Image: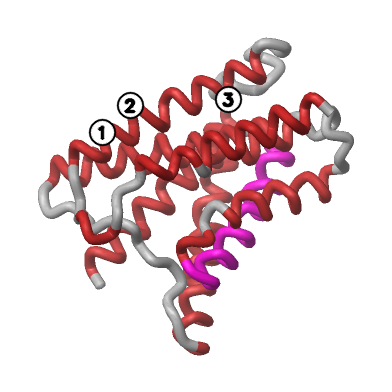
Amino acid sequence: MGIYIEALLLYIVLFFSGTAVLPAASEGFSVVIELQRIFLYSIPSIALIWFMILRTKKIKDCNLIPCKNDIISCLIAFPCLLITGFSVTFFSAFFGGKSVQILIQTPSAAFGWTVLGISCIFFAYLEESFFRFYFLARRDELKLKAAAAIIISAALFSICHIYEGPWGFINSLLSAIILGIIYLRFKSLHGIAFAHGFYNITAYILAAGA
């Protein structure tokens, strides 16, 4: 029962209490806010999740040492996320509505884009650290089979993105299932985290050009 309480508390504290640091859409892009997201939210949250896992396991056993699987999983996950995102966008346009509602405006200067890109990578690491690295790696303690763990993890992940609207919710659900499968296949946090971060950066770039 303790592991369930721990997972629930982490989920609530990191992904619901943590949303207070997110800027409103009307505020526009702010380098200061993005730096706050990185140093006051993303990095401490990642450190907490990794601590919860590494207190009972070694880094080697958790597959945190960079290896070729990270590159392979990234090269597989990134195009899969792009295909999923474009497919959901196509169907949302066909049936009406927007697939994703961007919370903040995109930057206008190169420095702003650099900060935003770094923020996307760290936030992707945060989400992958919990929903894949923490949740799926501890599925035995949660007494869940792989398929059930992927579905529950994807559902929890999608709930955090419900602010993006119904199509954004669907995109998050499908993407989470894909990332969960890839994680279990390659045991690579770094690969899927970078793929996730690159996908988010791509979404911002496309939004800026729209």
Q: Inspect the magenta stretch and tell me whether residue 185 lies in it.
A: yes
Check if residue 171 falls in the magenta segment. Answer: yes
Q: Residue placed at 40% from the left, 52% from the top? A: 200
Q: In the figure, is residue 92 to the left or right of 159?
A: left
Dividing the picture into quarters, in which one does residue 145 lie?
top right
Q: Using the image, determine if residue 58 lies above or below residue 199.
A: above
Which residue of the protein is positioned furthest toward the left in this rendering?
Answer: 109
Describe the element under mark 1 as helix, strand or loop. helix
Expressed as whole percent of the image width and height from the top left, the position of residue 112 reads 17, 44
| Segment colored magenta | 165-186
Q: Which residue is mark 1?
A: 35
| Label 3 element class | helix
- Residue hosting label 3: 49
For the residue labelled by badge 2, is the local secondary structure a helix, a strand or a loop?
Answer: helix
Q: Amino acid at mark 1?
A: Leu
118 above or below 59? below
Crowding near pointer 3: few (<14 within 10 Å), some, many (20+)? Answer: some
Label 1 to label 3: alpha-carbon separation = 20 Å
User: What residue is at 33 percent from the left and 36 percent from the top?
Assistant: 37
x and y, in percent, of residue 42 in the image = 42, 32
Q: Is residue 18 above or below residue 103?
A: above
**Residue at the location (20% across, 51% down)?**
29
| Residue type (three-letter) at the residue carrying disc 2 | Phe
